[in-house]
Amino acid sequence: MQRILLTGGAGFIGSSLTEVLLKEGHEITAIDNFSDFYSPEIKEKNIAKFKEHLNYKLYRIDIVNLKELYSLIKGDFDVIIHLAAKGGVRPSIVDPLGYEVVNVQGTLNMLELARSLGVKQFIFASSSSVYGQNPNVPWNETDVVDMPISPYAATKKSAELHGSVYSHLYGIRFIALRLFTVYGPKQRPDLAISKFARQMMQKETLSIYGTGETMRDYTYIDDVVLGLKAAMDYKDSNFEVINIGNSYTVSVSELLKVMGRIFQMEPKVIFESEQAGDVHQTYADISKAKKLLNYNPTTSLEAGLLKFRDWIYKESNK
Ligand SMILES: NC(=O)c1ccc[n+]([C@@H]2O[C@H](COP(=O)([O-])OP(=O)(O)OC[C@H]3O[C@@H](n4cnc5c(N)ncnc54)[C@H](O)[C@@H]3O)[C@@H](O)[C@H]2O)c1
């Protein structure tokens, strides 16, 4: 049993992880401010069934508020899993300062909290976006990531750097997992698969940015949860950056073909100009994750989309 302090616990990945960890008998103290980046009602729904669980506590705190973190979060924790963030590439171009405050200062606050509480293991949700337009695929953790192309990506890279500092100065083991487009039940409504599915079900025309050739490495939520769990037990070094992807990249056009088959409809598509901040492709080299975390994603895109479809059909019939 581990005592886990989890930020962003009401979000897509945080609530999916909570479900598994509670089943395994761990204790979870979750922090979330139920931000209105997307409907807070969805987040309330995500955590509804945990609220009465004896091993679950929820604090509605903004991670930017260090004073409140210090005064409310007490106790011994084996690990901090830090998922709270402002997500999304395009909105970060509109609000770079807001992203900096939550994603960088918020992460520093959590590192300070780790220091003051004596927590020695810190897992951070970084992002494939830090690789920018790197043409050498699949992307490897040793690649230079000094040229991000969105404020969001820059905040994730900055947070990794702060993690390195805290691991060096204070012996806090910092593991940054660079997540590659995560999808599955409860997926954030602003992300492509979720948005496309809803539009297809409403028989709406889908707007595709670019020519449909943009490539993404889509990673199923259950595989990401396994990666996060493995990182909780990783003890062999004090600082690591590790890709968590599916290592299988497909174009948006191919994705839509598979979705069309699964949802049994031909999507109607209009192509719009490419969006600033979007990278052309993402593709994870996961050999390091295999070696250090024994991470082996097992859900193919088609199998994951089928599970996602079953979930969204159930949701829309409620
Ligand atoms: N979903 C993906 O494809 C993906 C890919 C790469 C990285 N990530 C990272 O993984 C993490 C989780 O992503 P997600 O898809 O579950 O997003 P999400 O938006 O569903 O979850 C994030 C949660 O953090 C909370 N939050 C935001 N700002 C906060 C603040 N100031 N204080 C406290 N809580 C706050 C939100 O209310 C939300 O519940 C994020 O750090 C994200 O950047 C996600």
Image: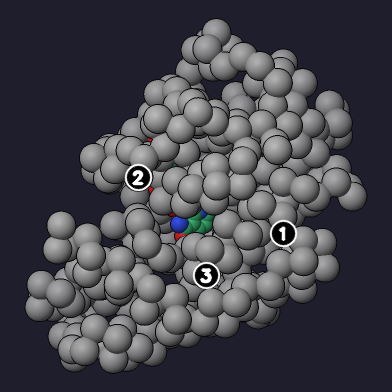
Amino acid on which the number 2 mark rests in the picture: Asn
The first of marks 2 and 3 along the sequence is 2
- Which of discs 2 and 3 lies nearer the camera? The answer is 2
Q: Nearer the viewer, residue 58 or 279?
A: 58
Amino acid on which the number 1 mark rests in the picture: Ile
Q: Sort mark 1 into few (<14), some (14-19) or many (20+) by Cα contacts within 10 Å.
A: many
The verdict on label 3 being within 8 Å of ligand 1 is: yes
Q: Sort mark 2 into few (<14), some (14-19) or many (20+) by Cα contacts within 10 Å.
A: many
The verdict on label 2 being within 8 Å of ligand 1 is: yes
Q: Sort mark 3 into few (<14), some (14-19) or many (20+) by Cα contacts within 10 Å.
A: many
Q: Secondary structure at mark 2?
A: helix
Q: CA distance from mark 1 to mark 3?
A: 14 Å
Residue at image mark 3:
219
Residue 166 visible in the displayed image: no
Q: Nearer the viewer, residue 95 or 204?
A: 204
On residue 242, which mark appears?
1
